[in-house]
Amino acid sequence: MTDLSRIRNFSIIAHIDHGKSTLADRLIQFTGGLTDREMSEQVLDNMDIERERGITIKAQTVRLNYTAKDGETYELNLMDTPGHVDFAYEVSRSLAACEGALLVVDAAQGVEAQTLANVYQSIEHNHEIVPVINKIDLPAAEPEKVKAEIEDIIGLDASDAVLTSAKSGIGIEEVLEAVVARIPAPGGDRAAPLTAMLVDSWYDPYLGVVILVRVINGVIKKGLQVKFMQGGTEHLVDRVGCFTPKRTDLPELGPGEIGFITAQIKEVEQARVGDTITTVKNGATKALAGYKEVQPVVFCGLFPVDAADFEKLRESIGRLRLNDASFSFEMESSAALGFGFRCGFLGLLHLEIIQERLSREYDLDLITTAPSVVYRLHMTDGETRELHNPADMPDPVKIESMEEPWIKATIYTPDEYLGSILKLCQDRRGIQLDLTYVGGRAQVTYELPLNEVVFDFYDRLKSISRGYASFDYEQIGLRDGDLVKMNILVNNEPVDALSMIVHRSQAEPRGRGLVERLRELIPRHMFKIPIQAAIGAKVIARETISALRKDVTAKCYGGDISRKKKLLEKQKEGKKRMREYGNVSIPQEAFIAALRMGEE
Amino acid sequence: MARALYIHWPFCVAKCPYCDFNSHVREQVDFGRWREALLADMRHEADLAGGEPLESIFFGGGTPSLMPPDLVEALLAEAQRLWGFAPDIEITLEANPNSVEAARFDALAKTGVNRLSLGIQALDDEALRFLGRAHSLAEGLTALDIAQRAFDRVSFDLIYARPGQTAAEWQAELERALAFGTGHLSLYQLTIEPGTRFATDVRQAKFIPLEDDPAGEMYELTQELTRAAGISAYEISNHARPGQESRHNLTYWRYRDYCGIGPGAHGRRRGAATVRHKKPENWLEAVAQGGNGIREERTLGQAEQASEALLMGLRLAEGVDLAEVSRRFDFARDDLIDAGRLGLYQSLGLAWSDTDRIGITPKGFPLLDALLGELVPEALVSA
């Protein structure tokens, strides 16, 4: 156990690519947590996806033993928090486990929207924030301008910001000294009943579920019977330790300390982020504040391209779920896509991550249906129900009213793109709340319906701002909306995978866009194919694919059948990747491309 | 037992830009060596698939009209010795309609060739130049005249749906062609085959092939005009007055056994597919080494044979006898054709069925490849 005065718990806040992971690596290296040989790039981001995308999905923590210039050895717990809004709740728990944060800002790029949201959260947790201006050795670095931005936009004193280049190893010791000097030591009472916050949990094939904890009061050690106050379960602690970043067993964790425990738990679902851990005997009576159950907000169907992969998909989803209790799934069947799963996610990035992990780690070829949000339906008979899937939309005459989730979005952009971004928000039914300029940048705040955002909003934003705009959001609750279910009919048959719930005002342009795109994507058949977008019986957009006129091998001669046969084999192979509606074979690519609209 | 023999002569004076057949240009050909090799290759086939008199022989190429008549004569004499000839045997030879070759038509007729297939290709000088043909229209017409006098049966080929060709232009050309009164016509739409000079030209945007829609319309027009002239299509691209069909080609389309000798020739005998070495020198070498030019001989499964029978048979106006295919290849009749699909395409007027027979309508013919993909069950194709 380390004396409280010599513990520092801190996180790093940074926008993607601003160098958070590199800085973390340098801190580990400097304090000798790993030898140079053991250092692989970005130690903290364990998953391939995390490394490739430069994002953190699971919270990680590293204990650094640092002998400061005052001669004392400090225990520094560096918490690497998820950086994305989809994991806002996990972020808030990670932040709650710390007393301070390093705010890493790229010396050339300046402050970004995502950074802002996390900084504000950190400020809400009363953190001491140490600004770090990174990449100062870049030719385009403008540390003074960035300091001014930090002061103007965030309102933090940046005069003693630490200047670093994590890549070149400049300013690393100064960062560690600033942590020791400026971030407060944690409080806590060793004699009080155990209260520890469950910061995060993940599944390890050898250890079972590993739980990251921050001890507030009391002591947690091996052999202790503990209770999860929210989950209501009891477990025997069988291992206590920390990561340096190598897993190191410890006899105990005392107040103010961050580390891990294992307790023979099989599923992460039983170890919910934000729960309070106490002892079974003489435990605390009051749980820590701030626990909430996370609910999926974005839903989509996941279907195997090859129907034979359904069992594999079921198994893979089950396994992923072992490590990520925040997504939900239930079986779904679609006339177009066969058997699959309706899955719920914390947000679009979460959806993408799960989808990518399924295809990469489990080698599955998947079709994803259009993401949809959760609507609340007020039925004429007084019942209230939630709608996750457009296919389950009841008869409109039985619906009294519908509510849809709204968000407050903060967009931060170089002002040359502002006009197009305002138009995009306006087109998506946005309500402008605020618009401010700082230097050459603008910050806009909009209220937007979430269903407009899940529909390619982020892609559009990126493309119109050439990737310079950053975007963050928080949910602000449900609002009434004039929503309708739009069906797409191919050869007069509805294609379930393409039906969607849209605002009445958006139905026509979206329907037109979709049928136009399908006309390009569906190959000609031997008959005319009408493609329609309809609300109920009312057709709002229509295109026709004309009939194929010619597809023949003119000359088949000399008894050479082989080429003809190959052609037929190829045709059949192609058909396997198609789904059939009203005698029309729709290529899988058409579904995927139709659902990924708006990049025209 | 094969009752049809195909003999491939691989040489041409020049390679035509649209042609993807096995044709080669050589400075010199050692006719003596070729004669011996072809005879050996023929004897190999006769040993394996002899026993019944031949009903047809086809000299294809390449340009078989470049063969010295005495070589043709020697090959026919050997074939007759090995198999014997049915009394009404059809012996076809493909010929180019230029003056040098036309001068040999009489001599060729004396060897026993009784049917000439002339590569006229177009009745328009500009089109002939585009198609890379060595002959002019005038030469072509003279050759046709000589041929009609020298041979009992004459057919000629035309290539239409050329880039920029209009329906009216084609109608005029076809009407003129019909007026020559031959018993048989092969009317091919121009297709750009991979590996040909035309494929390169298209890639380099030197010309744009005619779009499928106008080509489809021209096909329809062709059917109307030939039907009115009493020379309807009996196969996708082949037209004949009743009784004037190419019996040899019908053997392929009806999926009967045939022997194929010479470079690149394909054969089917007793459930085995044979392919001969394509390159003339390799074929010669193979014959010299092993007494035959076979590169690959493979036994086909029942399903594969059934699918081949359908692929070929559905090219014919007469269609396919499903009961017969079922018997021949011991394959359940219901598994030969997707009945649901057949119903759909029948209702669209693209296919027909009549007790045991099914077939493609003239309206369906230009869509045959797409139709086959729909009608032939996957189990037959992937088997």
Image (cartoon, coloured by chain):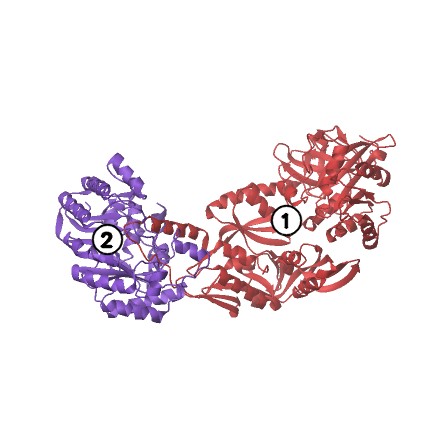
Q: In the rendered view of the protein, which quadrant contains the C terminus of chain B?
A: top left
Q: Which residue is mark 2?
A: B65
Q: Position of residue A64 (x, y in %)?
A: 77, 33
Label 1 marks which chain's residue? A
Q: Which residue is mark 1?
A: A350
Is A560 in front, or is B173?
Answer: B173
Q: Amino acid under label 1?
A: His
What colour denotes chain B? Answer: purple
Instruction: Locate residue B301: give its quadrant.
Output: top left
Q: In the rendered view of the protein, which quadrant contains the N terminus of chain B?
A: top left
Q: Secondary structure at mark 2?
A: helix
Instruction: Locate residue A393: give its quadrant.
Output: bottom right
Relative horizontal placement of residue A381, taking residue A146 as reference (left or right): left
Q: Position of residue B239 (x, y in %)?
A: 25, 62
Q: Position of residue B264 (x, y in %)?
A: 30, 45
Residue B301 seen in this snapshot: yes
Q: Amino acid under label 2?
A: Ser
Q: Secondary structure at mark 1?
A: helix
Is A344 in front, or is B140?
Answer: B140
Q: Using a 10 Å C-alpha cutoff, classify the residue at mark 2 as few (fewer than 14 neighbours), some (14 to 19) or many (20 or more).
A: many
Position of residue A28 relative to residue B314, above or below, is above
What colour denotes chain A? Answer: red
Label 2 marks which chain's residue? B
Position of residue B36 relative to residue A579, above or below, is above
Q: Using a 10 Å C-alpha cutoff, classify the residue at mark 1 as few (fewer than 14 neighbours), some (14 to 19) or many (20 or more).
A: many
